[in-house]
Amino acid sequence: MSERQHRAHHPYDRLPDAVTEVFGEEATAESAYDLLTVDVPATEWITALRTARDELGCSYFDWLSAVDEPGTGFRVCAHVAALGGGTVRRLMLRTTVPHDAAVLPSAIDVYAGAAWHERETHEMFGVTFEGHPDLTPLLLPEGFEGHPLR
């Protein structure tokens, strides 16, 4: 099989059309500007990250953060990429947690590089990442109260 044929058969290239096959029935996806964005329920966050890494080859963790969506909750986003085969495949995974229950499982068992990003997101937005070993403040001065990006 040629490199071109191999790329055409990469699981990533079936998306966004096959999003429910790959990420589950409640997942949605869109593609724009060479970035595939997949939204999953919070209950599927870790499963989606593992799927990205193990099935789509997105072994490169770039960043994780959140956006405060008034009236909706916090949209937590992780940007990962598959770098193999001479083609960069970028994937943004997103989920939403309510303001009054801003809790997600930690991604560090899937992407160790998420540790500092989760600390920052916890500090700035107040999202708790269950299972994270050290959600101590990272950037704000000692004694700062609240979450400045809420």
Image (tube, helix red, strand yellow):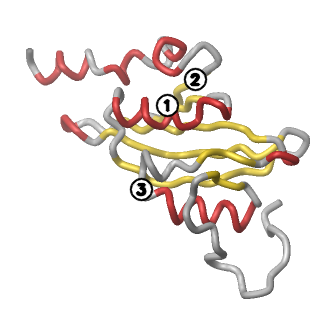
Which residue is the extreme one toward the right?
71
Residue depth check, mark 3 versus mark 1: number of the one nearer the observer: 3
Q: At which x and y percent is residue 1?
A: 8, 15
Horizontal placement of 32 versus 40: left or right?
Answer: left
**Residue nearer the viewer, 24 or 133:** 133
- Seen in the picture, residue 149 relative to 91 is either above or below; the reply is below
Name the amino acid type tagged 3: Ala
Q: At which x and y percent is residue 62?
A: 44, 53
N-terminal of the two: label 3 or label 1? 1
Asked if the residues shown at circle 1 and circle 2 are in contact, with their CB atoms under 8 angstroms apart, the answer is yes
Residue at 60% x, 30% y: name it.
Answer: 44
How crowded pointer 3 is (Cα within 10 Å; few <14, some 14-19, many 20+) is rated as: few
Asked if the residues shown at circle 3 and circle 1 are in contact, with their CB atoms under 8 angstroms apart, the answer is no
Horizontal placement of 97 versus 36: left or right?
Answer: right
N-terminal of the two: label 1 or label 2? 2
Judging by the rendered image, the residue that carries numbered circle 3 is: 112
| Residue 36 numbered tag | 1
On-image quarter of the C terminus: bottom right
Judging by the rendered image, the residue that carries numbered circle 2 is: 29
**Residue nearer the viewer, 79 or 137:** 137
